[in-house]
Amino acid sequence: MSTTTLTSRAMDTVQTTRAAARKSALAYVGLHAFAYERASERVSKIRTARKAFFETLVVKGEEVEAEGIKLFGKAKAEATDTLLDAKGAVIDAGDKVKNILPKTLLPTSKVERMEAEVAELEAKLKKMSKKATKKPAAKKKTVAKKAAPKATVKTEAPAAHIAYLEDARRYDADVSEAHIKAIVTHLGIALHSQDGKFVACTDDKERDTVRDSWLVKKLGVTGTTEILDAKVVSICEAMKADRMKKRPTFYYLLAKAEGKLSAL
C-alpha cells in the first residue's frame, strides 16, 4: 500500500474523529440548552400559575371583606335597635312605676324640694302675720323693784408680808414689820415663783445673785468678791436649820448684819 493511501486514510480517520467530537460537544451544548428551555418554560408556567393564584386570593379576600362589612353593619344595626328597645323599655317601666306609686314617694329634684320648702315657709309666715294682727297689744306689767341686797362685809386677807414677818421673827424677835414689808415690796412678783421665794445656798449662781443684786446693788456694800461671798455664806450658816430659806428673811438678816436696815 502506498504512502499516499495511508496518509489519506489517516486524514479521514482524524476528520471522522473530529466530526464525532464536534457532534458530541454540540450534543452536550444542545442538552444544556434544552434543559434551560424546559426549565424556563416551567418557571414561566409556575409564575403564571402563581400570579393567577394570587389574583384569585385577592378576589376571595375582597369577597370576604365585603361580607364582613355587611355582617358588621348588620350587627351594629341590631345592637342599636336592641339598645333603643332597652332604653324604651326602661322609660316605660319608669312611667309605670310613677303611675303606681303615690306622689309622696316619688323622688324630686333639689330645685323642687327647695321650692316646696319656700312655699311651706311662706304659708307659715302668712298664718303668723294673721295671728299677730288679731291679738291685742299686751299690757306691760309693772314689776316691783327689789331692794338691793345688803353689801356683805368682806374680811380682808392678811397682807403678803405678814407670813414673812412671822418667819423672820424666828431669827429676830425685834424685827420691824416696815423692814419686812419694804423687802417684800422690793422683790415684788419674784416671790410668786418657787425659785424667787427661796434662796438655794448650795447653788453658786444663786449666791452670786444675792451678792450682786442685793448686797452690792441694793445695800451698797463694797469689798472684794471673796469678802462679799463670805458675808452671803455667813447668812447661809445662820439659816442652815431651814432646808427652804425664805428670801425676805435671808435678805433681812443680811441687811441687819451689814447695818444697812436704813437702806431698805
Image: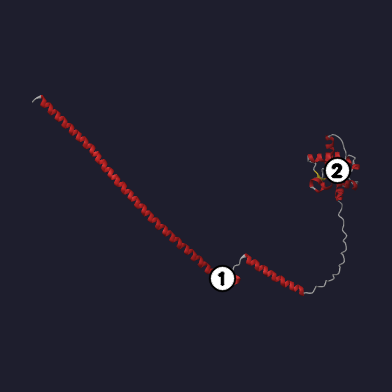
126, above or below 167, in the image: below
Is residue 87 at least partly visible in the picture?
A: yes
- Give the position of the N terminus as an image quadrant: top left
199, above or below 7, in the image: below
Q: Residue at x 76, y 73 (%)?
A: 133
Seen from the viewer's position, the closer of residues 88 and 6 is 6
Residue 64 image position (x, y, % from top left): 38, 56
Seen from the viewer's position, the closer of residues 128 and 234 is 128
72, above or below 227, in the image: below
Judged from the image, the secondary structure of the residue bearing numbered disc 1 is helix
Is residue 170 at least partly visible in the picture?
A: no
Mark 2 = which residue? Answer: 251
Q: Residue at x 86, y 39 (%)?
A: 217
- Farthest-out residue, top: 3
Residue 200 image position (x, y, % from top left): 80, 43
Residue 245 image position (x, y, % from top left): 82, 45
216, above or below 194, in the image: above
Number of numbered discs visible in the structure rendering: 2
Q: Residue at x 18, y 33 (%)?
A: 19
The kind of residue on which mark 2 rests is Tyr
As measured in the structure, the alpha-carbon distance from the residue carrying label 2 to the one carrying label 1 is 95 Å
State the mark number for residue 98. Answer: 1
Crowdedness near tag 2: few (<14), some (14–19) or many (≥20) residues, C-alpha within 10 Å: many
Asked whether the beta carbons under mark 2 and mark 1 sit within 8 Å of each other, the answer is no
Q: Residue at x 30, y 45 (%)?
A: 44
Residue 96 image position (x, y, % from top left): 54, 71
Q: Quadrant of residue 131?
A: bottom right
The kind of residue on which mark 1 rests is Lys
Q: Nearer the viewer, mark 2 or mark 1?
A: 1
Mark 2 / mark 1, whichever is N-terminal = 1
Please indicate whether residue 158 sits to the left or right of residue 109 in the image: right
